[in-house]
Image (spheres, rainbow, N blue to C red):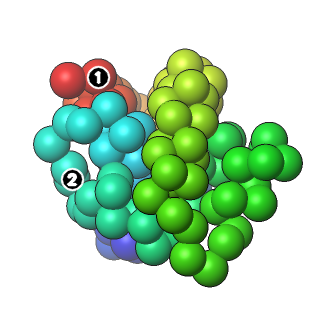
Amino acid sequence: MFEICACLGTHNETLRRFGHLLGVLYHGCDDVGDVKGLEALGGGGEEDLRDGILTLPASLAIRHPEIRALFCKQNPTPQELVAIAQAMKDRLPEAEQYLDKVAEEAREEARLYTTNPASLFALIDHTRQLSRR
């Protein structure tokens, strides 16, 4: 959706990658915010975990084989869900670093392909703050 909006706004493909990066940033910030218990933007953290949805923090947590096995279980117990949730919380600093890199890549796209990127920088900065409230 973010890619399409960027293409529609420019009437070409110039900012397609920017749109992709902004979408990744938005969803990643929402995922991190959910784990932190912040106001959800597009879904709920507990529901995502219960339903086995692979969010940014979950993708980092399942690098550990034990957590991966729990995450892939058909019906994890409440205690197993707590273990997965804790592993996701433990990965939040890494998730935040990843989001900072995505934001910087989006800034670079804006620098390269616009003559006045200030409004796109503001959009990136606003989006990046969603996981930091």
Question: Image point 56% across, 47% down: which residue?
Answer: 84
Where's the N terminus, which quadrant?
bottom left
Residue bearing the label numbered 1: 132
Please state the horizontal and vertical placement of residue 33, each as a whole percent of the image.
31, 38
**Residue count near mark 1 (Cα–Cα under 10 Å), binned few <14, some 14–19, many ≥20:** few
Circle 2 sits on which residue? 41
Q: x, y (%) of residue 121? A: 34, 28
Measuring 27% from the left and 59% from the top, which residue is drawn there? 44
Q: Do tag 2 and tag 1 residues touch (Cβ < 8 Å)?
A: no
Q: Nearer the viewer, residue 37 or 6?
A: 37
Q: Viewer-proximal residue, 115 or 61? A: 61
Residue 15 % position (x, y): 49, 54
CA neighbours of label 2 inside 10 A, class few (<14), some (14 to 19), many (20+): some
- Give the structural element (helix, strand or loop) at label 2: loop
Q: Is residue 66 above or below residue 52?
A: above
Instruction: Out of 121 and 64, give the one closest to the viewer.
Output: 64
N-terminal-most mark, 2 or 1 = 2
Q: In the rendered image, is residue 12 in sight?
A: no
Residue type pointed to by label 1: Arg
Is residue 115 rendered to the left or right of residue 108? left
Residue for point 56% across, 26% down: 90
Q: Distance from label 2 to label 1 (Cα)?
A: 13 Å
